[in-house]
Image: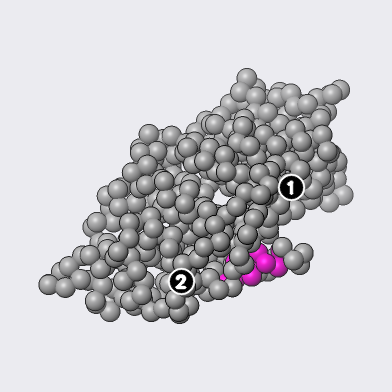
Amino acid sequence: MKLGFGGHVGRTLSALRRPRPDHFPALRSVVLAVKQRPIHAKATEFLQNNQPDWTESMHDVREAISKICSRYTDEYWLDKDNKHEFPLDLHRDLANNGWLGICMPEEYGGSALGISEATVMMQTISESGAGMTGASSIHMNIFGLEPVVKFGTLEQKKRMLTPLIQGKEKACFGVTEPNTGLDTLKLQSTAEKRGDVYILNGTKIWTSTAQIADKILILVRTTPLDQVSKPTHGLSLFYTTLDRTAVQVTEIPKLGRAAVDSNVIFFENWKVPAEDLIGEEGNGFKQIMVGMNAERVLVGAEALGLGYAALRRAARYAQERSVFGRPIGKNQGIQHPLAESWMKLEAARLMLYLAARLYDQGHSSGEHANAGKYLAAEAAFEACERAVLTHGAWAMPKNTMLRDI
C-alpha cells in the first residue's frame, strides 16, 4: 500500500504483517510475550498484532511509528527528563518523515489521513516508552491548528500550516487562565484593535512548550462579557509569533514530564498583527470547539498507550522477579489485578476507536469521544497504579520509568 506522508507522495509503508494470534489472550499470553524481546519491542508489539478491526493504513501507521520510536530508549527519555531538555530529536524524526501533518491537508504538506490513523500514532508514541513526554511534544501539531484549516484564509493556511508540518516552527496553545480555569467563557485576557494591530493584555497558564515555541494559538476577549448577547460571543482567536520582547514566559516546576515545559504567560501591550486573526472577530469560541471531539480522542489514545506500557512492564517484572523460589507472576494476587486492568484498557480502546471512526465518517461523535477519553484515563490510571504495586519498592527509582509512562 502506498500513502503520501508530508507531501512525499508515493512513500511506501511496509504492508508486512506479523502473524496475529487469538484476539482474546489470557494474562499468561501477556506475561510470556514480554520474555523474549527488548523492552521497546515488548512495549509496542502486542496491540500491533491484535487489532483485526483496524484498517490497513492504521496498521501501516502503527508499524512506521513503532520503528521511529524504537530508536528512543528509556535512557534517552530519562536523560531528557533529568536535563529538562525538549525531545527535539523525536520531533525532528517525525517531521522528516512527514508525520507532523498526519491530519493536515496535502496541499500544505500534510497527509490528509483521518483521526483514526492519528489516534494510532499518538497511542503508539505514548506506548513506546516515550509516555506523555513524547506525546505532548507533538500533540499541538496533530490537530491544534484545525481552526486555521477550517477558518483561515488561503494565505494564512500556507503561511501558518506549512512551517509547522515541516517542523520548522513549533507552536503552543494559550487558553487556560489562572482565575478562570476551565470556564473558558469567563476569560479575562483582552485584545483591542488599533489600526492594523491588536493590543493584547492578560495572563495564560499551563501553556505547554512555550519555552521553545515560535508561535502561539491564543484565545482572548475582544468584546467585554457584559456587552455581548451570549457568553460565547466576543472571544477571538489569533495564531501569531510568540514575541519574547512583549511576552514573559515563566516555567512551572512539575513533579514529572520535566522535558516538556508548562508555563505561565504574561503579556502587556503586546502588538499582534490584524492579519493573524483567525476567521471573524468574536467567533473564537466557535472556532476552538471545531475538532474538540477529535482532540479528546487523541488525548484518550495517549492515556491508553500509558496504560498498555505500564501493563507490559508490570508483566515483565512479574515474570522476572522471584520470591520464595518462584516468579511473583505465578501468584493470583499479582495476575488478577493485571488481567482486570488489561480488560478495562481493551474496553476503553474499543470506545476510543469507535469515536475516531465516527468522526472520520462525518458523524457527531461527542458522546463516544467523551466516554472514550474518560474510560481510557480511568483504565490507564488503574494500570499504572497496579504496575507500581506489582514492582513494590522497585517502582520508586526513576530509571524504572513508571513515573513517566
Q: Position of residue 241 (x, y in %)?
A: 68, 28
Residue bearing mark 2: 19
Badge 2 element: loop
Specify the amino acid type for callout 2: Pro
Q: Is residue 387 visible?
A: no
Look at the numbered discs 2 and 1 and tell me whether their residues touch, using CB distance below 8 Å.
no
Q: Which residues are magenta?
A: 350-359
Work out whether residue 101 or residue 388 is closer to the camera in this orientation and state it: 101
**What residue would you read off at disc 1?**
105
Mark 1 crowdedness (10 Å alpha carbons): few <14, some 14-19, many ≥20: some
Q: Horizontal and vertical percent for residue 253? A: 44, 38
Vertical position of residue 174 compared to residue 334: above or below: above
Check if residue 356 falls in the magenta segment.
yes
Give the image location of residue 262, x and y in percent.
Answer: 52, 39
Q: Bin the neighbour count of mark 2 within 10 Å (Cα to Cα): few under 14, some 14-19, many 20 and up.
A: few
* Residue at x 28%, y 76% (from the top left corner): 333
Q: What is the secondary structure assignment of the residue under circle 1?
A: loop
Coloration of the structure image? one colour
